[in-house]
Amino acid sequence: MTQLTAWPPRTRADCLALDQADPLAALRRRFALPPRTIYLDGNSLGALPRDTPAHLAAVVREQWGRGLIRSWPAAGWIDAPRRVGDKIGRLIGARRGEVVVCDSVSVNLYKLLAAALRLRPRRRTILCEAGDFPTDRYIAEGLVDRLGDGYRLRCVAPTRLAAALDRDTAVLLLSHVNYRSGAMHDLAGLTAAAHRSGTLVLWDLSHSAGIVPLRLAAAEVDFAVGCGYKFLNGGPGAPAFAYVARHLQPRLVQPLHGWFGHARPFAFTADYRPAAGIDRLLVGTAPILGLAALESAIDLLLQVPIRQLREKSLRLSTLLIRRIQGELQHYGLSIVTPSHQARRGSQVSLRHRRAWPICQALIAAGVITDFRAPDVLRFGLAPAYLRYVDAWDAITRLRRIMRTEAWRDRQYARRSRVT
Ligand SMILES: *Cc1c(COP(=O)(O)O)cnc(C)c1O
């Protein structure tokens, strides 16, 4: 890591000095953030880039309003899933033509899992991690249930994954960074281990794309999916992305045969013939407005090296972990996230029996964090727009809440529908 002033910071003034010297300070100014708010939820919904509203307004007014149907070719709408996919490909170390933007993570998981099973017809097991993001598991369960014929989903503890790979494992389905704990797997190592047993891998990069340097092609990853609205800042419900290694594309058969995945959508032929490359993952008409918001956010991210974001992210998480260890552990808060830097993504998760009301009290104090059932408080760290002083102040406010037991106030007890 590059040498910085006063590291590790011991005072708030040290943090202000770090922010002054931060090479990413200019990037933060490109985001529209609400005043007096410390936003530690960029891993759930990324912040709004300043350029996005004007870009969206122009797409709506000019391309939709004036161009109307002509904008499909003239404004590049028709190429948007591939174009934005290739831009995301640069963030995750994919080759051109290996990434496409479409649908949600859940739907892309369904398509890719089904395709992976077809590529390993003699095998019946999908291996996954117990405690991984629920939608990944629900989708896999739904698929094996629908297929019948001995297909099964096997979930094991994260440390047992490599040992659980066997000759019946068709596909290893795994989040690179666990949404709850923030623990990060060795992507290249597990991919190689899977391949040694003839198993395909499907990585969910929702919590690492755009924040951890990734080299999917170099690691020979087979499949991946990821989320557009977390660290990629594409906005609420932004379309997701899907990656398929180039050599697997010609043989890839996915179950949702829609007209946009057809070799010639506008030939309107009666028979389905899949497009040649990654386009065969497309199903229906692309959400152009969602793609436009995502593209302007990706264009912004592409202006800085991911390595720089990763370095700052690790400094932020180290700062949080040190202060929590030093000042908060006697309040019953324990750190769930691995202390080893190479093993963590871009968040610090704490466990506490009363995590819910503590989280609500923090939000009331201007620190937006989130709660993950049953007892985890997550501090998501988006180094593109989070300052060192924000991390410092968040802990100071948490300490005050713990010391005064402000979280016991009845207003913080009620659970809402979205957490
Ligand atoms: C956020 C997230 C998703 C989101 O799935 P959608 O279907 O796009 O809502 C899926 N998997 C993981 C691991 C996530 O973190």
Image (cartoon, rainbow, N blue to C red):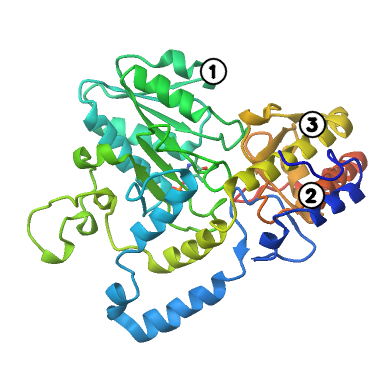
Q: Earlier in the sequence, mark 3 or mark 2?
A: 3
The answer to whether mark 3 and mark 2 are in CB contact below 8 A is no
Q: Which mark is residue 388?
A: 2
Q: Quadrant of residue 350?
A: top right
**Residue on which the image places disc 1:** 159
For label 2, the crowd category at 10 Å Cα-Cα, with few meaning under 14, some 14 to 19 and many 20 or more, is many
Inspect this view and state whether residue 176 appears: yes
The x, y position of residue 415, in whole percent, is 67, 47
The kind of residue on which mark 1 rests is Thr
Residue 77, horizontal then vertical, whole percent: 33, 69
Q: Nearer the viewer, mark 3 or mark 2?
A: 2
Nearer-N-terminus badge (3/1): 1
At label 3, the amino acid type is Leu
Q: How many marks?
A: 3
| Figure quadrant of the N terminus | top right
Q: In the depicted view, which residue is nearer to us: 334 or 229?
A: 229
